[in-house]
Amino acid sequence: MRYQKILVVDDEENIRYMLKLALEDAGYEVELAQNGPEALEKLKDSVFECVICDIRMPEMNGLEVLREIQGIRPDLTVIVMSAFGTLDTAIEAMKLGAYDYVSKPFKQDEILLTLKKAEERERLRKENLLLRKEVEKKYSFDNIIGKSTKMQEVFRRIEKIADYKSTVLITGESGTGKELVAKAIHYSGSRRNYPFIAVNCGAIPGDLLESELFGHVKGAFTGAVASKKGLFTEADKGTIFLDEIGDLPLNLQVKLLRVLQEGEIRRVGDTRTLQVDVRVIAATAKDLLEEVKKGNFREDLYYRLNVVPFYLPSLRERREDIPLLVWHFLKKYSAETGKEIKDITPEAMNALVDHEWKGNVRELENIIERAVVMSEEEMITTEYLPEGLVKKAYDITLKIPESRISIKTTVKEIVEIAEKELIARALAKTANNRTRAAELLEISHRALMYKLKEYNM
């Protein structure tokens, strides 16, 4: 977005008119006020998107004007300026709600750059408000949040196969939400009124897992003082979710294959078989085909499981979903803690979007829960995010090999690497909207199209 109308408040006439000329040349509509009371009157009569206000003025100083503005228009962007500025004054102004602080004398470009940053912040703020509404309606499916193309495809596939008994294999990194997808399939389909049983194949020792899955009869082994139903029996007519299926021991893989082929189980120590009607949904973070090659997983079982494959993208592959997820978790943990977290700063949101998320959605949820618990305000700022997650804007690491000596070729390669990274980042943030991406990159749409072709992106 771009501000249309700006109010400049300063008791020095030359500063007022210098700013008016510079801002009008940049395309803004500008009104002037020579003191605080006049500025407040103008704010009552007209709608401004931004106020640039001096600190040192007679009658009413800039901080007093700022306090009054917060009472009238708390959402209004205010930039304060002073020739007598100190760090304490700047901090006080920011605490009172000023967006930024500029020391006099300043160059015209400095004011214009500050305005541009403020406009981007306001655009993100409005986008965040829109995202909050979107989270509650459009982009959710049984607590799975996502507007990215990849997640919309997941939602479509869930709807297609929910009513069928076909076996499903969900793959993806740890923390991507595999159990949520399994539950969505179950509760969206015809088996929704019957049990959904989840079991982590890697969390139960192998010697106990067979009894846990298939049950046992009394006296089947030491300690089996009574017969026990297995989880497959408990899940009859419903769904069993076998998480970390890649950790299932080979001897139990044979038994699972029989369930899938024949629809029957045999309890430990029993001579009879029992019929079960269970839909099997399996999940793994491992590459099962690679495990087949290594001899750790049966090939015939792999193909029996992989009837309907689901791949869940990592959070790094769907960064455009991060703001939606942030608002979802903010709402969830605000309700749980009884806090009223109403917003998140653009700086904090950008830090979350740029993070690598090796722990995926689970890691993001944990960080938002922590931020809500630790927050003492109604807004989440970078202060409440882990230190390693927040990178300073100037943190650019560059390592040039010792063998390189030519400035021309090296700089060309550095520029190419940087441009590719920044273009990819802008496209991810805008869901591949090239017009918006060009705006973020501060280049023309034509220049972006040329670079996409040049870099084969």
Image (tube, grey):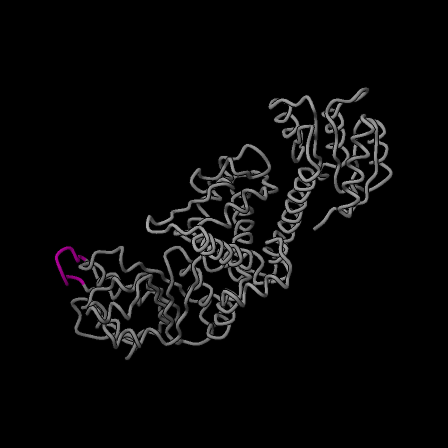
Q: Could you tell me residue 216's position as x and y percent?
A: 21, 64
Q: Nearer the viewer, residue 410 or 220?
A: 410
Residue 72 vs 452, above or below: the answer is: above
Hey, which quadrant is residue 198 in on the image? bottom left
Residue 451 vs 408, above or below: the answer is: below
Q: Nearer the viewer, residue 225 or 279?
A: 279
Q: Residue at x 65, y 34 (%)?
A: 100
Q: Nearer the viewer, residue 213 or 30?
A: 30
Q: Could you tell me residue 102's position as x and y percent?
A: 66, 31
- The secondary structure that dominates the magenta segment is loop
Magenta highlight on residue 436:
no
Q: Could you tell me residue 134's position as x and y percent?
A: 62, 56
Which portion, as a residue range, is magenta? Answer: 218-225
Q: Could you tell me residue 109's position as x and y percent?
A: 68, 40
Q: Residue at x 66, y 23 (%)?
A: 85
From this viewpoint, is residue 193 visible?
A: no
Tell which residue pokes out farthest to the left in this image.
222
How many numbered dots are placed on residues in this image?
A: 0
From this viewpoint, is residue 411 visible?
A: yes
Q: Residue at x 66, y 49 (%)?
A: 123
Residue 134 vs 306, above or below: the answer is: above
Hey, which quadrant is residue 68 in on the image? top right
